[in-house]
Image: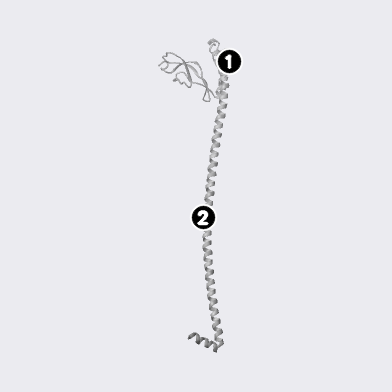
Amino acid sequence: MADEEIKKKNAECPENADTENVNTEAAEETQETKAETAEGAEEKETEKEGSKKSKKFGKEKVDKEKEALKEQVAALDDKVKRQLAEFENFRNRTEKEKTASFDNGAASVLKKFLPILDNFERGMATVPEDKKDDPFVQGMDKIYRQYMTELENLGVEQIEALGKPLDPNLHNAVTQQESDEYEPGTICAELQKGYTYHGIVLRYSMVAVVPE
């Protein structure tokens, strides 16, 4: 009944019908606008969520890459330190081998001078007491002392023997002798002097030991 009355009124008054149509269209446009606005808001919200997820994923990716780079740097740093340590050990070992090689070479040469030293000492020991002030003997003594000084400067040292306990690393016991001056097991006589060079035995001391 209400619709029929409205239709009648609209038929009687065309202006009311136009207004009604305008209102209806406006209402429909408003609803469409609201729908579009809601849809747009929904799309923005979706985009925002997507952006957040993208940023989160991007941050996680960057963090993983940073962690991987840190591990690589740590591995390289450890490798470099190991190589430096190996090089240092190699250098020290090479220096020791070089020094040992030089010392062994020098020792082999110095051994050849020991018989000359022995002959000097034997010759000086045969000089009578009344001839020790002779100029020739004095000259030979000076040469002997100079010879000994140069050997000492090179690092040659005489092995101590008399009164010392027998040391197989330094002494070569060739006989036993009774002695009231030295304790049993100690060296009581030195038959041939021994020498070392920087810890290398050039020649063992040839000694006699008091029996125990």
Front-lying residue, 137 or 152: 152
Instruction: Give the x, y percent position of residue 97.
Output: 55, 29
Which mark is nearer the camera, 1 or 2? 2
Query: Mark 1 or mark 2, which has the lower sequence index?
Result: 2
Please tell me how crowded label 2 is: few (under 14), some (14-19), or many (20+) other residues with Cα within 10 Å: few
Looking at the rendered image, the quarter that the C terminus falls into is top left
The image's mark for residue 140 is: 1
Image point (55%, 36%), residue name: 88
Front-lying residue, 33 or 57: 33
* Placement of 14 over or under 169, stated as above or below: below
Determine the CA span between mark 1 and mark 2. 92 Å
Does dot 1 land on a helix, a strand or a loop? helix
Please tell me how crowded label 1 is: few (under 14), some (14-19), or many (20+) other residues with Cα within 10 Å: some
* Amino acid type assigned to the residue bearing label 2 in the image: Glu
**Residue at image mark 2:** 60
* Amino acid type assigned to the residue bearing label 1 in the image: Met
Image point (54%, 74%), residue name: 32
Instruction: Give the x, y percent position of residue 93.
Output: 54, 32
Instruction: Give the x, y percent position of residue 6.
Output: 51, 86
Does dot 2 land on a helix, a strand or a loop? helix
Front-lying residue, 81 or 50: 50
Image point (52%, 52%), residue name: 64
Front-lying residue, 156 or 141: 156
The image's mark for residue 66 is: none
